[in-house]
Image: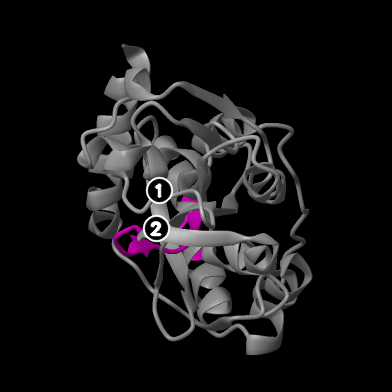
Amino acid sequence: IANYVSQKIGKPVELRIGKTNAEMVDLLGKGEIDFSFLGPALYVETTSKYKLTPLAQIVNDGKPTYYGVIIVKKGSGITSLKALKGKTFAFGERDSNLSHITPLYMLMEAGVRLSDLKQYSFLGSHDNVALNVARGSFDAAGLQPDVAAKYMDQGLEIIARSEDLPEHVFAASKSLDAATTAQVQNALLSMDSTLLKGIKKSLTGIQKFNDKDFDGLRKIAKTVEKEKMK
């Protein structure tokens, strides 16, 4: 994608990968990175500190949205989120939308607080989370659906699905000049589906988006942040 955009705008595009999400937020906000591909939670985090220019949003299976699921081990007897009081829960990365932020919000909406859980831990990758539930090390966890599907034959089942959430986006630093920002946006919006499928095979397109599309996720993040601070 970096090479493609470079060819389209006639300027070199250097690929940089932040060591941490916090580093990415600051580099993009301060203009040391001109534009970036961001997960929805990271986009919300960055825009809470800095202004960004929306460029484009990926379309997954015909929709600019995705969702998360909460899984348990089949035969556990757990059939609802309320039943997770007194149980153990596995989260993924602390800043992951589908393996931490959204599942925690779903638990809270069902009346289950962190203090109601017997134990919770952060296990890193979605695969590691799924395997720990499949092995019985944890009672439940939040996952992205495609990872959950990979481990269904190991005895996992879904007990809850999140609301639809806005998909990943490309956004530019406010310090990038308007002409180049427009060129980058036009290049991204005309990107061939072959390039998109290099990100994820189920991607079917790319479109413009509005920052207000993320207000719902901002509410989720704000609610979860208050819970984590207690």
The magenta span reads 161-179
**x, y percentage for residue 84?**
37, 37
Spatial distance from mark 2 to mark 1, Cα to Cα? 8 Å
Residue 52 in the image, given as x and y percentages of width and height: 41, 47
Q: Is 119 placed left or right of 111 in the picture? A: right
Residues 109 and 47: in front is 109
From the top left corner, tell me how far across and down residue 63 is, in percent: 39, 79
Left or right for 96, reference 20: left
Q: Nearer the viewer, residue 179 or 229?
A: 229
Looking at the image, can residue 39 be seen? yes
Callout count = 2
Write down the residue under mark 1.
78
Within the image, what quadrant is residue 218 found in?
Answer: top left
Q: Left or right: where does residue 168 sit relative to residue 9?
A: left
One can see residue 174 in this view:
no
Mark 1 and mark 2 in contact (Cβ < 8 Å)?
A: yes
Numbered badge on residue 121: none
Identify whether 29 is placed above or below 227: below
- Amino acid type, mark 1: Ile
Judged from the image, the secondary structure of the residue bearing numbered disc 2 is strand
Q: Is residue 34 magenta?
A: no
Q: Quadrant of the C terminus?
A: top left
Residue 192, placed above or below residue 69: below
Q: Which mark is residue 159?
A: 2
Relative to the observer, which residue lies in front, 85 or 112? Answer: 85
Image quarter of residue 138: top right
Give the number of the mark in front: 2 or 1: 1
